Image (cartoon, coloured by chain):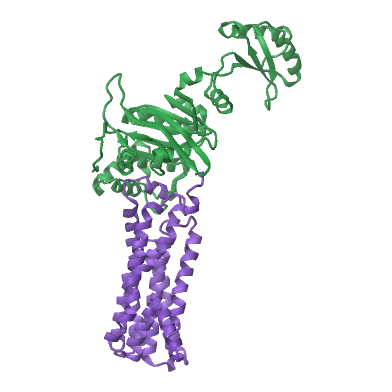
Chain colours: A green, B purple
Amino acid sequence: MQHGKADVQPMTSGGDAIASGSRTDVLVAEGLQKSYGPRQALRGLSFTLKAGRLLGFLGPNGAGKTTSIRILTTIIEPDAGHFTVDGIRHEHPDQIRRRIGVLPESFGLPKQMTGIEYLTYFGQLYGRTASDARSVGLELLEEVGLKDRAKSLVGTYSHGMRQRIGIARALVNDPVVVFLDEPTIGLDPRGQQELLGLVKQIAQERSAGVILCSHLLTEVESVCDDVVILSSGEVVATGTVSDVIGRTEQNVVRIRVPEAAIEESQRVLEATPAVRKVRAGVGMPGWLRVELDDAAAEDEHVNNRLLEALLRAEIPVLSLEPEGGRLQDVFLQLTAGGIR
Amino acid sequence: MWIGGKALYLMLIYTVLLGIYAYLFASNSELNLLPQREVVLEIVKVSIAVGLFVCLAIAADSFSGERERATLESLLLTPTSRRQIALGKFLAALSPWPVAPLIAIPYWLILAKGDPVLGPTALWGVVLGTLLAPAFTGMGMLVSVWCNSNKTSMLVSLGLFLLLVLPAGFGPTERAAELQLRSDFIQWLNPMAATARFLQATAVTRTPGNDLYTWMTTPALFPIVVLVLLFASVGPGLRLDAGASRMWTTPT
């Protein structure tokens, strides 16, 4: 594969082994901003992606995720700020495109091409010879589990197969950064699980940095190493998944009881020591949101006391879980207001 | 595009249309009364016009079609420059043009019935058509760059085509000198009308070639103007969402 010249030489190739304990920064973004007329869609996006790491990109609709991805994939230019991919500055979009692979959220496929023809075509667009592109295409089809369908028309592929060949196309140039925008959308749970496994494999085996945009917070929590949460164009949280989850309020417990027992449960719990406030869950019948004192947050027996109080009142407890222990809780909290 | 694609279908339609046209000329008793050279002129003009339309139609799909099929983003994400992408599509859309005259030759031969006017008329028709084919292809692509929908792109392209082709049907008229001059100037500005006048002068009035070069000016300049506009605008103009009004639109 041929590469053009750039001001900064690429620091890695997608297949380099990463030295133990050290990972190269494959993507560094600083202060990216973008406006569409009077509306500021992105206000200062900054983050770093290391080789071999999976970064989850989260945010509600209109948060600026798509704008961010389009800037980082050189589809549009930022109004301010800069970013580098593998040491190449964003002023060289053609060089950056040689180093990245992208699976857009909605992408079409030419129905009259076979899988191998499609990958060969894109391989050639990235500068490979026809034979080289074809052999790389066959390897990729095997990697994504489509070896048996290489000669089938893409128009006959199922949705899951189309996502897989889209991922294969994103890898055709052996990228150092892979962008996957909603890769599991429309897939059944098994398909989602298989695809996420493939994504994790890409990050680990190819030592590529992977940016995963998704609305499925459970999938981001399960596969991603790091996460960036956007809200209204700003970064509201960034860090490892466990760090970000740990930043939310710890002193809230959710308890589910039969709907008929909500009021009595509320009375019982409010009378329990260490409970500051009890509210019925809005839009969630049967759920109670129990806020504990700050001191109780450190007490590992507090949940037992809450259960005991309800059981003594002969109120069946259907579920008890700490709030803030999931990425979904973090997301809802951070995108509705600020962090603690 | 050629194997089971749109170029093949359009050339088949082209062949059928020419066949119908030739049949009408051959079988219709009123049309049979036309002088042979005018019959030759008409069939050559129609062959060129429809051949140009095929190139225009394919070009009009080049970017708006990719947007509709959601395949443009994948293309824009490759290291291939916008101009290189445009050049590839331009050459692909232009590829039916050399085939069109080859398909038309049998019809020309049948309708000419051995009249020697066929030689120069056909030759000049092919020459002028070859000058205009890149222009019409470029025009279709220019429209396509700025349209999000294939339907809009096709309609606008068809409108431009009719705007250029219909006035070409109005030949020189017998009017006062001043009106004639104005009419000639308007026709000179229109590359298709200029081509029609050139061919008419060659086939019907048999005007010497030296006196006709004025009518070749617009067919020669038109493609240069269109192609300069196309390749100048395709760099900044080729976006995922088309059109200047979309520059400020939030992406979905």
* Count of picture labels: 0
Q: Is residue A164 visible?
A: no
Task: In this rendered view, identify the residue nearer to me: A80 or A325.
Answer: A80
> Is B162 situated above or below A81?
below
Task: In this rendered view, identify the residue nearer to me: A312 or B172.
Answer: B172
Counting from the top left corner in percent of width and height, residue B209 is at 27, 85
Identify the image quadrant of residue B111: bottom left
Q: Quadrant of the N terminus of chain A?
A: top left
Identify the image quadrant of residue B122: bottom left
> In the displayed image of the protein, which residue is found farthest to the front?
B178
Task: In this rendered view, identify the residue nearer to me: B71 or B219.
Answer: B219
Q: Residue at x 72, y 12 (%)?
A: A315
Counting from the top left corner in percent of width and height, residue B41 is at 37, 85
Task: In this rendered view, identify the residue nearer to me: A304 or B38.
Answer: B38
Q: Quadrant of the C terminus of chain A?
A: top right
Q: Residue at x 29, y 86 (%)?
A: B211
Q: Is residue A281 visible?
A: yes
Counting from the top left corner in percent of width and height, residue B87 is at 32, 58
> Is A271 situated above or below A114?
above
> Is A263 situated above or below A36?
above
Q: Residue at x 50, y 61 (%)?
A: B152
Identify the image quadrant of residue A208: top left
Counting from the top left corner in percent of width and height, residue A338 is at 55, 24
